[in-house]
Image: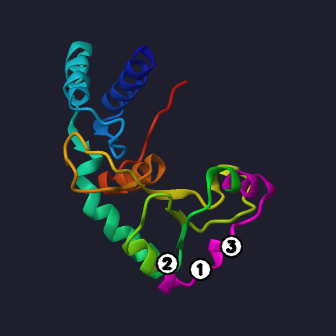
Amino acid sequence: HIGHAKACLLNYEFAKRYGGNFALRFDDTNPTLAKKEFYDIVLENLTWLGVQPDRIDIGSDHMEAFYRLTEKLVDQGHCYVCDCDADTTNQLRYKGHACAHRDQAVEETKRRWAKLAEGEVLRLRIDPAHQNTTMRDPTIFRVIYEPHARTGAKYHIWPTYDFETCVMDAIQSITCLLYTS
C-alpha cells in the first residue's frame, strides 16, 4: 500500500544519498500472515517503483539462528515459559506486576522451552515495572500450528515480530532504519 511504498522509497533514497545499502527483508515469522504470493508481489512492486535492493533476506531462513540465540538466553536465565491467558497478562502488565512464572528456575524453563506447547509462550525477563508497558516481559516466541509458505510444517514455535526484527538487524548489521507514519 501507499504507506509501505513511501517508507520503502524514503529508506532507498536515504541509502543512495548517503552511500549506504538498501536491505529488503521479509519479516515472515508469522505463518498465518506469510503467503507465497506476497513475496513475488513485493518484488514486483519494488521493480515498478524503481527500487533495487542491495540485498534481500527472509526472516524464516534464519529460524535456526533464532533458536540458537534463544537457547543462550534461556541458559543465562533471561527467559521463562508462561501459560497465563492474555487477560491475566495484560492486567499484571498494566499494574507493573509479574506473573508467578517469572520466578521459574532455569532448569524448569529449559524443560518447558524444549517442548513448548500451544497456549504457552516464552517471555524475555526485562522489568515488570518498565516505563514502557510493551517492554514488561514481552513474548519472544509462541506456538503457531499452521504451515508456512516457505518452510511448510517444519516449525511450530515461531519468534514474534519484535524479537525477529531486532535479531535480524544484528544479523544483517543494520545501523539505520527510517520509520514513517
Q: Position of residue 179 (x, y in %)?
A: 50, 32
| Above or below, comparing residue 132 to residue 11 in the picture | below
Mark 2 residue type:
Thr
82 part of magenta stretch = no
Residue under label 1: 104
Instruction: Give neighbour class at mark 3: few <14, some 14-19, many 20+ (Cα, 10 Å).
Output: few
Which amino acid, mark 3? Ala
Taking the magenta stretch, the answer to whether it contains residue 92 is: yes
Whether the residues at callouts 2 and 1 have beta carbons within 8 Å, the answer is yes
Residue drawn 50% across the image and 62% down it:
120
- Distance (Cα) linking label 2 and label 1: 6 Å
Which of the two discs, 3 and 2, labels the residue nearer the N terminus? 3
In the rendered structure, find residue 76 and report the number of the disc placed on it: none
Residue that appears at 26% across and 45% down: 147
Pick the front one: 10 or 149: 149
Q: Residues within 10 Å of mark 1 (few under 14, many from 20)?
A: some
Please state if 91 lies on the left or on the right of 150 as rendered: right
Q: Name the side, left or right, on which 72 lies relative to 104.
A: left
Please report contact status of discs 3 and 2: CB closer than 8 Å, yes or no. Answer: no
Where is residue 128 shown, x and y percent of the image?
A: 71, 63
Q: For the C terminus, which image quadrant?
A: top right
The tag on residue 100 is 3
CA gap between label 3 and label 2 equals: 13 Å
Q: Which of the marked residues, 2 or 1, is nearer the chain's N terminus?
A: 1
- Reading the image, the residue beneath label 2 is 109
Q: Position of residue 106 (x, y in %)?
A: 51, 83
